[in-house]
Amino acid sequence: MRRTSIVSASLMLGLVASACSEPVTAPGAMDVVAGPQLSVAAGNGLQRGSVALPSGLISDLRQVALGNEAINPADYVCTQTEINDFFLDNAYNIIDNEFEIFDLLYNDLLADEVVMYHALYILEDDQPQYFGYNGEYTHIMQKTHRDAKRFFDIESSDIQLLGMHGSMLADTAAVAHTYRYVYGVDPVTAGIFAGLIKDALEVSTTVNGGNHPLFSFNAFAISAPGFIPDKIVMGDGFMAGLDALGYGDVGPQAIYAHEFAHHIQYENGYFATDEHANTGTGAEQTRYTEMMADAYAAYFLTHARGLALNKHRVAQFLEAFHQIGDCAFTNDGHHGTPNQRMRAAQFGFDVADQAHKQGHIISTEQFHDMFVEAYPAMIAPDA
């Protein structure tokens, strides 16, 4: 039986629960969208996280679900990372300056979910794709996609690479369609919601027309045969965060490679067959599959016949993996501590380094077996 794996990359960190600290509303900011339509948006019955996800496999898509502890937190060194701070700083810029707009877009109309579900359910690559707010990562993402398909021995010709853009919120037709298709909203109300979002984007001085991490701070892979094409989705906001922290030349490739590695797991059946993926708490199971994806990614990124990143760039990408570690020990979406994720990436680098002279690429199955053997040492306590 295929198991749905839903885990966290967007690092939202309970934003709504903590978003009530004396916000300052921009004077008159909501005047343009005020009126009877706002009463339709408020209390409209939309509930965050209520959409039924497809029966398949989804990795790195943000869904909060508390479970039991994966490990003893007292044994680990785990602190807030810069990528978390980047997201929160940008989110609170809206909250502190335009709380009514934040409240409308995030709490009432679930605009961030609209962006995510549009990419998940509706978007396909029959139209040209771009990556980054201004397309700045398009070339490198397309090249990395081609190189990964060539490098790994799985069937990957059907994997679509898609860009997730908060700016799609200005497209009222696409937004209304998402409300109808995903949430079951009637056409008239869906049109009202889409219009409210577009108006809010136009009057806001903080959300930059939707090009803001609040709406696209995510990256995920999905395999749901017969329902949704195999996809890797890269969010603009996540790539912007990596760039802001100095990882723009390596972070997007690293995140992409991690998502491609999930497709290796899907194709080879590791979610269904691996002991570590099916025993222990939900957090422990997710940590295992995520750290394996880190290791595969590192192998590809540093192998002479992969992306062949040099030593300086390798150091950068290892730090990028550190940044997306988490301390959510009780969360079913736990990816591993920053140190554990760096160990997994280092494992992949070491395997690739050993093959540099002969340039041999080992099979995905052989790499998997090596990882399984090394895994217990990777999750040893940090303390």
Image: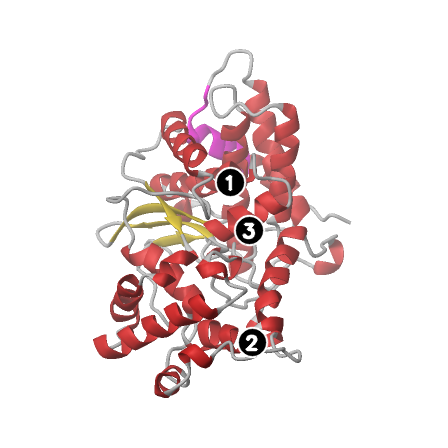
Mark in front: 3 vs 2: 2
User: Which numbered marker is on residue 327?
Assistant: none
**In the depicted view, which residue is nearer to us: 229 or 198?**
198
Whole-number angstrom distance, CA of label 2 to CA of label 1: 31 Å
Q: Looking at the picture, how far across and down is residue 368, in whole percent? A: 48, 34
Numbered disc 3: secondary structure: helix
The amino acid marked with disc number 2 is Phe
- Measured along the vertical axis of the image, is residue 169 above or below residue 230? below
Q: Tell me where residue 108 sits by quadrant.
A: bottom left
Q: Residue at x 63, y 33 (%)?
A: 346
Q: Is residue 260 magenta?
A: no
Asked if marks 3 and 1 touch (Cβ < 8 Å), the reply is no
Whole-number angstrom distance, CA of label 3 to CA of label 2: 35 Å
Name the residue tied to disc 3: 287
User: Which numbered marker is on residue 252?
Assistant: 1
Q: Looking at the picture, how far across and down is residue 219, in whole percent? A: 46, 50
Side (left or right) of 158 relative to 46? left
Name the residue tied to disc 2: 99
The amino acid marked with disc number 1 is Pro
Magenta region, residue range = 361-372
Side (left or right) of 18 relative to 167? right
